[in-house]
Image (cartoon, helix red, strand yellow):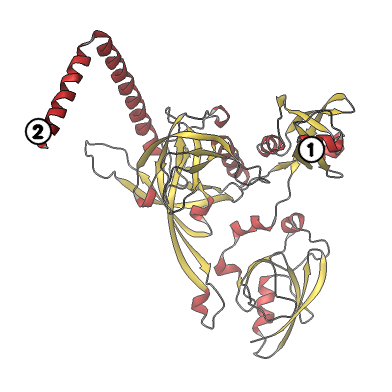
Amino acid sequence: MLRNQLDGLMFGFALTLVLSASPASAQTSARTDTRAADLSSSLESAARLVGPAVVEIFATSYKTGAGLVARSADLLTTERASGSGVIVAPDGYILTNAHVIDRAQRVRVDIPEPVTGQSILARRSRTVSGQIVGIDRETDLALIKVEEQNLPVLTFADSDELKAGQLVMAFGSPLGLNNSVSLGIISSVARQLESESPMIYVQTDASINPGSSGGPLVDVRGRIVGISTFIASHAGGNEGLGFAAPSNIARTVYEQIRKGGRVRRGDIGVRAQTITPVLAAGLNLPRESGVVLADVTPGGPAALAGLQPGDLVLTLDDKPLENGRQLQVGLYRRFVGDIVWLEILRDNRVRRMAVAMSERKDSLDSLSASIDPRENLVSRLGILGVNLDDRIVESLPVVRVRNGVVVASTVAGALDAREGGLAMGDVIFAVNRTAVNGLAELRTVLAGLKTGDPVVLQLERQGELMYLAFTVE
């Protein structure tokens, strides 16, 4: 048996010598070795460029317990998390994922120190405090600021130029293993995971694991093409399905948060749908593919520009549109105040229209970035509340109440009320006919109640006033 194995090995070795003796084979092998060496050198250079600009982030936050219990200490628990980030400005601005620093009260950033020796052991670093500049939950991106100067930075590439099969590298601290690098390719340049969402992702098979979140996905030139955000996995680890927020979206979020502390999203007030053969036949449309406007919001920017339901949208800023998603994604990247040009088809006539982007009204979810459970908890009602102000009034369908407390989140079953309890978005403006203008007054009124006392909350829910009655337990 052993003799047969040795004979096989010797035959394979001899065959290799014969083939390598061929001049053509030797030239091909040399060219292959050179290309491999060049690629390896490019990857090494990119790693040296990127590594110093990648940081590890540690976040400490407080969150409410699973339910209401008698002991107040159980209402809040400490939670610690870690992730990655990338320095995008030399004066200390760091881009990461929103979920890495979700409701964090303390943020620490581990910044690499310049390499001075030849040691291959763990890199040196220094830990500094970070401040949250702003969070955008819709894209799961956030901006942190550290008080440092002359930091190494990475630049943004144009994610619209990405191609499937392109080599990329993921940097970060997966499972706390800082300064890790993995290699892969672009699997999809624009993966939409929710049919109604304009948010798209760069899909990659580069290894991404818990702790990689917020780290940069870069091209072989060391430019940011995406921010690693999440993975799809059955087992919880990397299975070759990683997703990153595209660099063009990440850059827009960074610029807006740095300028104003939040993202102001543009909107023109339309609902676009993809034309299908059935839709075209039923509506007697002149084409079986493209984009049709199913709705135009009365009084919105599109309506003011002259757009109408039933219009076929041919181009956005001279770029042909093939489906409704393209229009959504194209508008998603525009700033408030930008002018977009739409080419439409109506009554067999092509028209070109300019539409000004107005600010989209955000939902209550945007409030969560500013909620601190230590400051916003109302334990007797089992809610996190925020004071109603002009900004919230503009964002919510609150049309009759101007003072009170907005329910930002609540614990299921906290109140034993026939009406079913409080809901996110409710505005509490009175307790037992005593007006409450904010959290302080609400807590004061509730503190005066004893077990067995009746309580009637007056609140507004989706534009309607109602009572919510229960007994103090």
Q: Nearer the viewer, residue 139 or 399?
A: 139
Q: Position of residue 79 (x, y in %)?
A: 46, 64
Circle 2 crowding by C-alpha within 10 Å: few under 14, some 14–19, many from 20? few
Question: Any mark on residue 278, and which?
Answer: 1
Q: Position of residue 269 (x, y in %)?
A: 79, 42
**Residue 95 in sight in this render:** no
Q: Position of residue 354 (x, y in %)?
A: 80, 30
Point out the tag, 1 or 2, that comes first from the N-terminus. Answer: 2
Q: Residue at 82% x, 61% y: name it.
A: 399
Q: Residue at 83% x, 42% y: name it.
A: 296
Q: Secondary structure at mark 1?
A: helix
Q: Nearer the viewer, residue 16 or 211?
A: 16
**What's the CA distance linking mark 1 and mark 2?**
71 Å
Which circle, 1 or 2, is nearer the viewer? 2
Q: Position of residue 107 (x, y in %)?
A: 45, 55
Say which amino acid is labelled 1: Val
Residue lying farthest to the top in this orientation: 23
Judging by the rendered image, the residue that carries numbered circle 2 is 3
**In the picture, residue 45 is in which quadrant?**
top left
**Residue 386 in sight in this render:** yes
In the picture, the quarter occupied by the C terminus is bottom right
Circle 1 crowding by C-alpha within 10 Å: few under 14, some 14–19, many from 20? few
Q: Secondary structure at mark 2?
A: helix
Residue lying farthest to the bottom in this orientation: 452
Say which amino acid is labelled 2: Arg
In the picture, the quarter occupied by the N terminus is top left
Q: Is residue 441 above or below residue 213?
A: below
Residue lying farthest to the left in this orientation: 3
Q: Is residue 378 above or below residue 451?
A: above
- Count numbered badges in the picture: 2
Question: Any mark on residue 69, and which?
Answer: none
Tags 1 and 2 touching, CB below 8 Å = no
